[in-house]
């Protein structure tokens, strides 16, 4: 059910924005992010045992689809405001680098969804260290802030 809602959410978003309707331009990135986000939200709702099953199943499309429509409306509104700027309408073709980054993004979400991140200290520490800023880019030392 979560997967069906996620794909439906991605389709609603793609229809309302025109993003992600082809695999040849980078609009697919945004559509995949929407699908993954809806999937995550849907699984959280389905896993909420404090709600009756009928509320979880019925509430999923009643919450997700209007929220996506609102997000698509905001996206289209921002696009409308920026449409006259140069390069806003120009799409970018997907390259192997884009596909690799999209694969890493999906692998990261899969690792969280399947619990790999919680079970593997090595993976957790590796990702935590990779996310740290380069020390040369940090403007000051902690001792400078102490009185």
Image: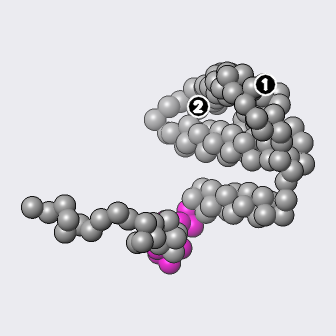
Determine the residue positioned at 56% across, 37% down: 45
Say which of 59 and 32 sits in front.
Answer: 32
Q: Is residue 127 magenta?
A: no
Quadrant containing the N terminus in the rendered view: top right
Say which of 139 and 63 sits in front.
Answer: 139
Q: Is residue 112 above or below residue 12?
A: below
Say if residue 78 shows up in the picture: yes
Instruction: Point out the tag, 2 or 1, that comes first from the N-terminus.
Output: 1
The span picked out in magenta is 115-125
Quadrant containing the C terminus in the rendered view: bottom left
Give residue 34's quadrant in the image: top right
- Rendered location of residue 111, percent (x, y): 61, 63
Disc 2 versus disc 1: nearer the observer: 1
Q: Along the horizontal axis of the image, is 32 left or right of 55?
A: right
CA–CA distance between discs 2 and 1? 26 Å
Determine the residue positioned at 90% across, 48% down: 24
According to the picture, the residue beneath numbered tag 2 turns out to be: 56
Q: Along the horizontal axis of the image, is 67 left or right of 15?
A: left
According to the picture, the residue beneath numbered tag 1 turns out to be: 16
Give residue 83's quadrant in the image: top right
Say which of 5 and 12 sits in front.
Answer: 12
- Rendered location of residue 98, percent (x, y): 78, 58
């Amino acid at each position: 059910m979560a997967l069906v809602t996620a794909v439906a959410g991605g389709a609603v978003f793609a229809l309302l924005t025109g993003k992600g309707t082809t695999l040849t331009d980078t609009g697919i990135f945004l559509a995949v992010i929407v699908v993954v986000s809806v999937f995550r939200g849907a699984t959280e709702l389905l896993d909420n045992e404090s709600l009756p099953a009928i509320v979880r199943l019925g509430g999923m499309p009643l919450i997700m689809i209007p929220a996506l429509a609102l997000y698509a409306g905001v996206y289209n509104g921002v696009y409308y405001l920026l449409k006259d700027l140069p390069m806003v309408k120009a799409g970018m073709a997907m390259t192997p680098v884009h596909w690799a980054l999209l694969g890493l993004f999906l692998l990261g979400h899969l690792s969280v969804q399947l619990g790999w991140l919680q079970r593997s200290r090595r993976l957790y520490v590796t990702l935590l260290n990779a996310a740290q800023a380069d020390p040369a880019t940090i403007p000051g030392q902690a001792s400078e802030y102490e009185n």
